[in-house]
Image (cartoon, rainbow, N blue to C red):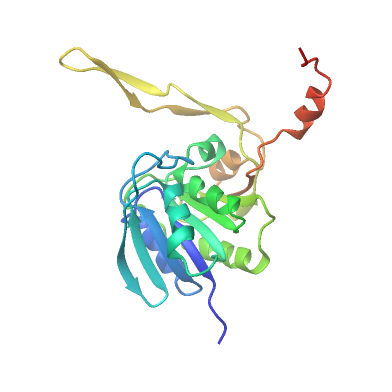
Amino acid sequence: MKRKPLILLSNDDGVSAKGLRELIQCLQPIADLIVVAPDGHRSGFSASITSEVPLRCRKISEQEGLKIYKCSGTPVDCVKLGLHALVPRIPDMVVGGINHGDNSSVNVHYSGTMGVVIEGCLKRIPSVGFSLCNHDSDADFSPVLPYARRIVEEVLAKGLPEGTCLNVNFPALSAYRGVKICHQNKGVWVNEFAESVHPLGETFYWLTGEYETLEAETRNSDYWALKEGYVAITPTRIDMTDYKVMDELEHWNLCV
């Protein structure tokens, strides 16, 4: 009998998040799953790791083809620990999500969900992150699930180039117009903090902000695709070298 693929799952919304539970149910029919997820919210943790305190990890459930662990660390800690101590063999995929919230455009740099995916990619494992542009803890993931399963099936069958992972974002809609293969939109967060004054006089700041695109009408950016009702798939490389600028810098007078 052919062995099922093995997938390592994690997220940044925590082991109890609805998006993770829905993803588990979606992928169980096609793969054995090992889930190593944070014990609480770790949104915005990007690729951060824990180095000053020991990690705690506990198995919270097990059944045929599914083990679930919760970990005191970051999303990347979860992947590192899972690969080091909890998986019986190198997984066929690492999958992050389904995230409650948008991880398109520059959000990829802050995202704990994409931290999961990039860590898997660094370990030369095909890796994909799924995000729904809806922060509601009880968001409706039902339109997402058929696409998530199909994308995972395609990656299991075809693989991904070494050093490339997929960042997949879904608009908060009941149905999608289709799928677009996208580039990362150019944009920036502005008005990032709301300032308040404590009754005792101390000033404090709440992280907030508004996303400001610098190329709103550029077709096939992830921002455009989501705005137009498409699933946005952005191939994302872990090598951030600007090779064109490397050539330019060769002509600078940099020696002293």
* Nearest the eye: 120 or 227: 120
From the viewer's perspective, tell me whether residue 37 is left or right of residue 188. left
Look at 40% across and 48% down and name the residue there.
12
Q: Quadrant of the C terminus?
A: top right
Mark yes or no: residue 140 visible: no
Work out whether 224 lies above or below 87: above
* Residue 143 pos. (x, y %): 46, 59
Query: Can you name the residue that lies furthest to the left here?
Result: 200
- Near-viewer residue (211 or 205): 205
Q: What residue is shown at x 53% (from left), y 76% (from top)?
A: 4
Residue 234 relative to residue 170: left or right: right
Would residue 160 be found to the left or right of residue 37 on screen? right
Residue 25 lies in quadrant: bottom left
> From what the image shows, is residue 213 above or below residue 7?
above
Instruction: Report x, y in % for residue 18.
Output: 34, 56
Location of the N terminus (image quadrant): bottom right
Q: Residue at x 42, y 75 (%)?
A: 65
